Each structure stands twice: as C-alpha cells, then as structure tokens.
Amino acid sequence: MAEACVVLLEQVFDEGRVLDRAIAEAFKANPKWGKRDRGFVAESVWEVVRWRRALGFVAGAEDPRSLLAAEWRRQGFTLPDWWEWSGVDVGEMENRESQLASQPRAIRESIPDWLDLLGSSELGDRWDAELSALNQRAPVCLRVNRLIASKEEVVSWLNDEGVEVEEVEGLDDALMLPLGKLLPKRLFQDGRVEIQDAGSQTVAPLLGVEPGMRVVDACAGAGGKTLQLAAAMQGSGEILALDVSARKLTELKRRAGRAGVRNVRMEEWGKNTLKTRIASADRVLVDAPCSGLGTLRRQPDLKWRLSKESVEDMRDLQSRILENCLEFLKDDGQLVYATCSLLPSENEQQIAELLQRDSRWRLDAEMNISPAATGWDAFYGCRLVKR
C-alpha cells in the first residue's frame, strides 16, 4: 500500500494527473484491495496533496516518500522499517514540526507563493479565513431529484438503508452526509439523489426557471446544474446543454437517463451554435470556466496544476464567453453568470467591465458564497437583465 501511495503522488505531482481520477483508476486496476486498503491509500494521498508544502517543510524534503513519512507521523502511525533509507530523520521532523506555526502563510496553509499573493491582493483580510476553510475536508452533499421523489421520501429511504443525512438550512433540496461518510454506489445509481455541493446548488435558483421555458446551459460540463434546472422545470420545456467537451456531454447523457430527465438536449459547441439561436432563450446559464479555487476542499490537487498565467487566460475566456452568450437571450430574458471562484477578478470585476462596455444590461441580483461563513464550496452568481 505504501508503494501504491508513492506511485499516485508521482502521477499527481510529476505528471499533472487529476487526483480523484488517478485514485479511481488505481482502485479499478487493483480489485483485490479491500475496503481498508482503499481507505488507507485514498486518505494518505489526499492529505499529502492537500498539505504538500507544510509536510515538505516538516520532512525537510518534497519527494513522495518524505511527504508520506511526515503525513503518517502526523497521523500517529509508526513508520515502516523500509522507510529508513528514505533519508527522513524522525528527530529532525519533530524539531521542524515545532517551527511550522512561525513559517509564512503559503507554507503553513500549503499553497504556491504566487497563489498566496493573488488571494491576499484580491481578498485582503478575508484571505486568511477563506484559505483556512478551503483546507478543510469537505463532506458529501446530496441534491434530491424531485422528478423521482420528495425530500421526505428520500430521507426515509436513506435512513432505511442505514445512511444518516441532515437537511441544509436555506436549501430546499440539499442533504448533507456526516464528514467522512460516502454514499454507497448502489444508492447513487438509483437516481433519487445527485452528488452536488451545497454551494453549487445556490446557482440554479437565480435563474427562476419555470415549466415550458427555453433554457441554454452554455457551459454544461457533466451537467450537475443542468439536471437541477430540469427538475425545477418539472420535465417541461427544453434545456439546451452546450459544452466544448464531447466526453462531458456523454457523461451528462448517462446521468440524465438515470435521473429520469427527458427535456435536455445535448450539443457540442460549433461555429454555428450561437448564430442559429440568437434571441431564442428565456434563460441562459453561464457557469463559466474558472480557476476553481472555491473547490480546493475537494480538489486540493488543483492548486498544484494552476499557474498565474492560466488564471489570467481564464479571465480572458470568461469575458468572451459572457459577451457571446448574452446574444442567446430574448428581450425579456435573463442570464446568470456563475463561477466556483472567490476571486473578484473572475466575478464582480467581470460583470463591472461588461456593464461598462455594454449599456444594454443591468445587474439584477448578486450573491457570494463564502467557504469560511458556510463550510460550502465558494460560488459567485449574478443575474443580468436588459434595461
């Protein structure tokens, strides 16, 4: 198991692999691993990825074996004999661990220096609390699929299956599992619930969709919000789910079938996609590509894959997508722009610049979900309407 952890960390740090996909593939390739083995590997690797810089300081090195040694010691495990040749000195680790609290924030909170500077410059005094919240483990949040069952029916069904859940204040369809608990796969395949973070569930209601409407989900991805909109429309009307990734749309098709959704049409973006649908939609959702910094609780590997340049490129892409997608709207239509970032440059600043360029639009509503205040993923959302 220890060597399996090393291999996974090399894939994430050296090859830029996405953490949850790498772990899923490792589990699939090793079907003889028991539940306990899978849990040990997953938790070890996730925590090393989350605390890479802090563990590197404690270990005095950043190779996977040294990082794992520091993590296992932090967990109270006895280091295996074969670890002796890794060069890690347990006594020195104890000494460095006592010095960790006095290190710069980027080391203590385990993020790249450039990201710490960016967060501090954009969020000021808020950055400390938000960063600390983003380093916490995230519980699994479910969304009840009302096309199949009511919340009360779902709670009763889950309880009968031995799954405890709590309702989430302020969200009609959200149920939270206890921290560290997962939904058994056989229940997830049922279709009565979808896994969707509470922060994510706040975006779709901004659209105010109604049965019979024509809706465009311009950056649908694998369709979490698409399916939420379909349920709110009670299966009536039409949702056009667009994305540049055919793979993600294939996943959306599979999920829609499981959820009993019949009013979603999926299409890959093409050169005539916008041209043939100008002024055709009652509602448009632009869940824009973004840095994803608001999701670091469940994607800690993201902070090692991002760069200052990639975030800047993302801002340019957001601006182009937003401006183009406004053309989908009818005169009395509404557009919601959303990101899972907490950076104002990807959120409020994008909208302010748009309104300055194009006086046809006005800001009708706006929200910011703070991980520090809610314990959810960060999300920004705003609604635009024609003047």
Image: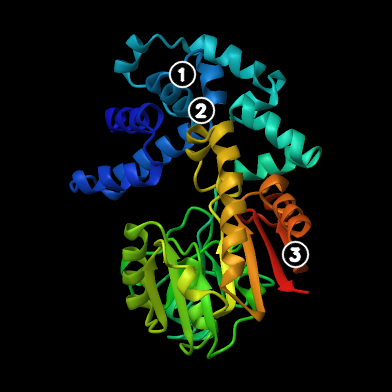
- Check disc 2: other Cα within 10 Å, few if <14, some if 14-19, many if 20+: many
Q: Quadrant of the C terminus?
A: bottom right
Residue at (30% x, 42% y) in the render: 37
**Is disc 3 placed on a helix, strand or loop?**
strand
Residue at numbered disc 3: 366
Q: Which mark is residue 52?
A: 2
Q: Which mark is residue 170?
A: none
Tag 1: amino acid = Glu
Expressed as whole percent of the image width and height from the top left, the position of residue 24 reads 31, 48
Q: Which mark is residue 62?
A: 1
Residue at (72% x, 58% y) in the render: 368
- Check disc 3: other Cα within 10 Å, few if <14, some if 14-19, many if 20+: some
Label 1 with label 2: CB-CB less than 8 Å: yes
Q: Is residue 186 above or below residue 355?
A: below
Mark 2 or 3, which is nearer the eye?
3
The front one of 108 and 369 is 369
Q: Quadrant of the N terminus?
A: top left
Q: Is residue 323 above or below residue 233?
A: above
Tag 3: amino acid = Glu
How many numbered discs sit on the rendered protein? Answer: 3
Q: Is residue 97 above or below residue 25?
A: above
